[in-house]
Image (spheres, grey):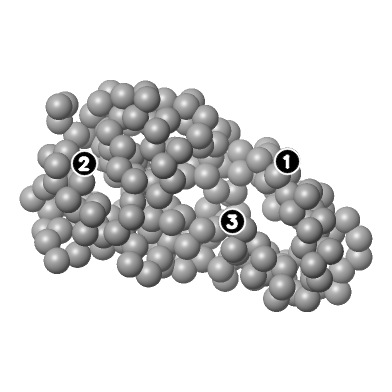
């Protein structure tokens, strides 16, 4: 097994709650009093604009104009975006302690590799201090690619100048892990902190004071 040089991290479902997944969308839509018909229409319109938004091709206001503000609303876009951002929280029983320990050790290149739109990603990076943890941000909104497209994993290893086999990718979704592994990366599906520690140790990521996390 090649020596690990870089660890690529998903964010939603591993470190934080998801930024704008189904649960978060419905929580905010309900908060603003949209009825079942409105929510169904929003979900019908969501996929295409969301793909463009997460790739950095359109702004949040363009996304909302095509999904939500297709008719007059009793609230503003700014109010809605603020509520979207408020959904982001540290994931209970997530991997944040491991991220901090690995970043502090300074042994590995610690890289964000996630699907997120720029406005939410920028907010999450700032709010949760991720500039102090990650050395690079291979986020969909910055590189114009979304998981599970194999090209985003290839772009990440190219940017970090590591071979796939020298890399670990951590994600909560099995499908994304399979793509990374198929490209030669090591893959760890996040389930619990203890399981993650064991998986990383089995790959040689150790001596990080991870015991008890």
Mark 1 secondary-structure assignment:
helix
Q: Left of 164 or right of it: where is 43?
A: right
Q: Callout 3: 10 Å neighbours few (<14), some, many (20+)?
A: few
Are circles 1 and 2 on residues that touch, CB within 8 Å? no
- Report how far apart the C-alphas of labels 1 and 3 lie in the structure: 14 Å
Chain-order first, disc 1 or disc 3: 3
Residue at mark 1: 48
Would residue 120 be seen by someone viewing this image from the given angle?
Answer: yes
Residue at mark 3: 21
Residue that sits furthest to the left in the current view? 207
Q: Residue at x 40, y 49 (%)?
A: 172
Q: Residue at x 57, y 42 (%)?
A: 141
Residue 48 position in % (x across, y down): 73, 41
Residue at mark 2: 108
Place residue 19 in its image quadrant.
bottom right
Residue 184 position in % (x across, y down): 31, 24
Q: Callout 2: 10 Å neighbours few (<14), some, many (20+)?
A: some
Query: 73 or 119, which is in the foreground?
Result: 73
Residue 84 position in % (x across, y down): 63, 65
Chain-order first, disc 1 or disc 2: 1
Q: Residue at x 41, y 42 (%)?
A: 174
Residue 117 position in % (x across, y down): 59, 49
Q: Left of 170 or right of it: where is 32?
A: right
- Report how far apart the C-alphas of labels 2 and 3 lie in the structure: 30 Å
């Amino acid at each position: 097994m090649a020596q690990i040089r870089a660890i690529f991290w998903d964010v939603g479902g591993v470190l934080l709650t998801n930024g704008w997944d189904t649960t978060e969308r419905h929580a905010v839509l309900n908060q603003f009093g949209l009825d079942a018909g409105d929510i169904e229409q929003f979900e019908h319109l969501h996929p295409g604009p969301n793909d463009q938004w997460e790739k950095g091709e359109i702004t949040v206001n363009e996304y909302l104009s095509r999904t939500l503000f297709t008719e007059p609303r009793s609230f503003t876009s700014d109010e809605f975006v603020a509520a979207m951002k408020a959904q982001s929280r540290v994931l209970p029983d997530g991997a944040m302690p491991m991220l901090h320990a690995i970043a502090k050790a300074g042994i590995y290149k610690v890289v964000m590799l996630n699907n997120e739109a720029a406005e939410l990603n920028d907010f999450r990076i700032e709010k949760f201090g991720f500039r102090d943890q990650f050395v690079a941000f291979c986020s969909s909104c910055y590189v114009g690619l979304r998981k599970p497209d194999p090209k985003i994993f290839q772009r990440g290893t190219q940017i970090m100048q590591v071979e796939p086999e020298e890399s670990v990718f951590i994600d909560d979704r099995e499908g994304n892990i399979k793509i990374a592994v198929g490209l030669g990366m090591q893959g760890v599906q996040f389930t619990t902190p203890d399981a993650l520690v064991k998986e990383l140790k089995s790959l040689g990521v150790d001596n990080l004071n991870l015991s008890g996390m």
